[in-house]
């Protein structure tokens, strides 16, 4: 059994917990927009945990950044006073989780070893790690690298919306290959004639995109091999696709599998998606 039920892509629902902040509490939705790393442990008296806490002072350049956030999450009620008294941990934010509010939100099982969970700026799980000696020496530099990395330079037309970590890479490749192998056609623009009647026109000087119809029936399920899968999951947090078994495209006659003709990038677009406010998903 895994030490946590949280999986890559899972959104974390907001909660409020006692913390070492000036207000004495932390509203978890305030972590949005940060690269966050959480360390879950039962007590600071655990020698393994104590070793990690001693190492935190080596990462002051990360702990004091506005785009990075580290949270230590302890189950030991006594840690509230013990950790507050440590001058070497003044810049560290701890959640005092004796009632398991945070542990339960992340699906961390009871009586487990210390572990790490990384979140993206949209409060979605990026990775989970059961602690091993020296792991913090890998996780903190990686966190800083992600926070300081410049946004990718896209040599393509700007899409309506681009979200990373929505569908897993193997499934994206499946969709791209579907697009390339199903006779994609130039995407028209909607204009009007002199009488005001709508006219669909191909205007390559204005719009250069190839579209591949993906679904015209009531629904279409694109099944993948057993080794790669994706599914739609509803939750109380942000709507996302998470890795699983399948993805369903609902019945919309104009549902398109779209790709810029000069780049290996695909986009699923739909005028009436059933996933809240998301209007398209870049892959």
Image: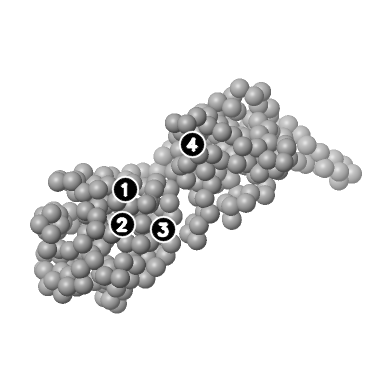
The Cα atoms of the two marked residues, 4 and 3, are separated by: 22 Å
- Along the line of sight, which residue is nearer the eye, 42 or 274? 42
Is the C-beta separation of discs 1 and 4 under 8 Å? Answer: no
Q: Nearer the viewer, mark 4 or mark 3?
A: 4
The earlier-in-sequence mark between 4 and 2 is 2
Q: Nearer the viewer, mark 1 or mark 4?
A: 1
Which residue is outermost to the right?
Answer: 195
Q: Nearer the viewer, mark 2 or mark 3?
A: 2
The Cα atoms of the two marked residues, 1 and 3, are separated by: 18 Å
Q: Nearer the viewer, mark 4 or mark 2?
A: 2
Is the C-beta separation of discs 1 and 2 under 8 Å? Answer: yes
The Cα atoms of the two marked residues, 1 and 2, are separated by: 8 Å
* Image point (11%, 69%), residue name: 86
The Cα atoms of the two marked residues, 2 and 3, are separated by: 16 Å
Report the residue marked by disc 2. Answer: 109
Circle 3 SS class: loop
- Along the line of sight, which residue is nearer the eye, 261 or 23? 23
Report the residue marked by disc 3. Answer: 12
The earlier-in-sequence mark between 1 and 4 is 1
Disc 2 residue crowd, few under 14, some 14–19, many 20+, Cα 10 Å? some
Report the residue marked by disc 4. Answer: 229
Report the residue marked by disc 1. Answer: 2
Q: Nearer the viewer, mark 1 or mark 3?
A: 1
- Along the line of sight, which residue is nearer the eye, 281 or 98? 98
């Amino acid at each position: 059994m895994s030490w946590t039920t949280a999986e890559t892509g899972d959104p974390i629902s907001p909660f409020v917990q006692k913390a070492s902040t000036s207000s004495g509490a932390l509203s978890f939705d305030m972590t949005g927009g940060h690269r966050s790393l959480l360390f879950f442990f039962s007590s600071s008296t655990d020698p393994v945990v104590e070793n990690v806490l001693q190492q935190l002072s080596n990462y002051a350049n990360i702990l004091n950044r506005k785009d990075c956030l580290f949270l230590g999450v302890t189950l030991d009620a006594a840690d509230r006073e013990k950790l507050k008294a440590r001058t070497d941990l003044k810049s560290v934010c701890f959640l005092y989780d004796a009632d398991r509010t945070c542990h339960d939100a992340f699906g961390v099982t009871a009586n487990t070893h210390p572990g790490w969970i990384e979140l993206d700026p949209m409060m979605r799980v990026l990775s989970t790690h059961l602690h091993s000696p020296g792991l913090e020496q890998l996780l903190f530099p990686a966190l800083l690298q992600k926070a300081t990395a410049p946004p990718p330079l896209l040599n393509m037309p700007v899409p309506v919306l681009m979200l990373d970590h929505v569908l897993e890479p193997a499934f994206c490749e499946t969709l791209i290959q579907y697009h390339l192998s199903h006779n994609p056609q130039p995407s028209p623009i909607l204009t009007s004639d002199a009488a005001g009647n709508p006219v669909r026109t191909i205007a390559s000087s204005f719009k250069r995109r190839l579209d591949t119809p993906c679904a015209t029936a009531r629904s279409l399920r694109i099944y993948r091999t057993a080794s790669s899968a994706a599914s739609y999951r509803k939750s109380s947090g942000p709507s996302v696709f998470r890795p699983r078994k399948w993805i369903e495209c609902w019945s919309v006659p104009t549902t398109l599998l779209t790709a810029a003709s000069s780049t290996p990038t695909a986009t699923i677009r739909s005028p009436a998606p059933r996933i809240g406010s998301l209007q398209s998903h870049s892959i």
